[in-house]
């Protein structure tokens, strides 16, 4: 059924299918290093990300965010690597990584994201507060948004330097 809906969507006149290729080893190392703001990527981290993500940029980005969330990266100088853990479980798909990350959020953070997703890609605290179905879950909205930004789930939208109105968007 999902495949049929996908085909119908692509057959519309205003839809364009863009096929993104996989990153090669060199590009993948550069991408990982850039995302982590380091000079080099350790062998364990690269081998794990390379074998699981197969060069898929979104999967790499979400895996890195998940590894950061779980404290599984170790920095040594300008190099980052994966910690040594015998029972390390790496999700098998980008959907599983995202699902695991969202499941690990508090109830109020999940509720905030659900409300924001109804609003659209961009949103702000005032609008969330106005339309949220359970205002009691918004008691910690500022700290919840800070945590969601720290986890790279949402980010501030920068428009003008002098603009004091804070807009957010999904990362």
Image: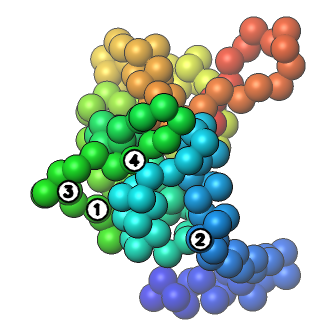
The answer to whether residue 113 is left or right of residue 55 is left
| Labels 3 and 1 touching (C-beta < 8 A) | yes
The residue nearer to you, when weighing 106 against 134, is 106
Determine which residue is flagged by label 2. Answer: 25
Determine which residue is flagged by label 1. Answer: 90
What x and y, as percent, mark residue 142?
A: 46, 14
Determine which residue is flagged by label 4. Answer: 81
The residues tagged by marks 2 and 4 sit, at their Cα atoms, a distance apart of 16 Å
Residue drawn at x 36%, y 31% is 109
What x and y, as percent, mark residue 32?
A: 56, 52
Q: Nearer the viewer, mark 4 or mark 1?
A: 4
Q: Element at badge 2?
A: helix
Q: Element at badge 4?
A: strand
The residues tagged by marks 4 and 1 sit, at their Cα atoms, a distance apart of 15 Å
Which quadrant of the structure image shows residue 154? top right
Residue drawn at x 42%, y 34% is 76
| Labels 3 and 4 touching (C-beta < 8 A) | no
Sequence order check, earlier mark of 2 and 4:
2
Question: Dot 3, crowdedness within 10 Å: few (<14), some or many (≥20)?
Answer: few
């Amino acid at each position: 059924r999902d495949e049929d809906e996908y085909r119908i969507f692509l057959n519309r006149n205003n839809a364009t299918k863009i096929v993104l290729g996989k990153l090669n080893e060199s590009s993948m190392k550069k991408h990982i290093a850039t995302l982590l703001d380091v000079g080099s990527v350790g062998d364990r981290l690269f081998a794990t990300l390379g074998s699981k993500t197969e060069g898929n940029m979104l999967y790499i980005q979400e895996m890195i965010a998940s590894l950061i969330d779980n404290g599984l990266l170790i920095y040594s100088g300008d190099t980052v690597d994966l910690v040594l853990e015998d029972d390390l479980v790496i999700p098998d798909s980008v959907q599983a990584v995202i699902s695991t990350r969202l499941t690990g959020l508090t109830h109020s953070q999940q509720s905030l994201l659900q409300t924001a997703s109804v609003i659209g890609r961009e949103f702000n605290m005032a609008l969330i507060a106005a339309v949220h179905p359970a205002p009691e879950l918004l008691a910690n909205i500022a700290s919840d948004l800070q945590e969601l930004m720290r986890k790279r789930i949402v980010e501030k939208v920068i428009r003008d330097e002098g603009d004091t109105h804070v807009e957010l968007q999904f990362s």
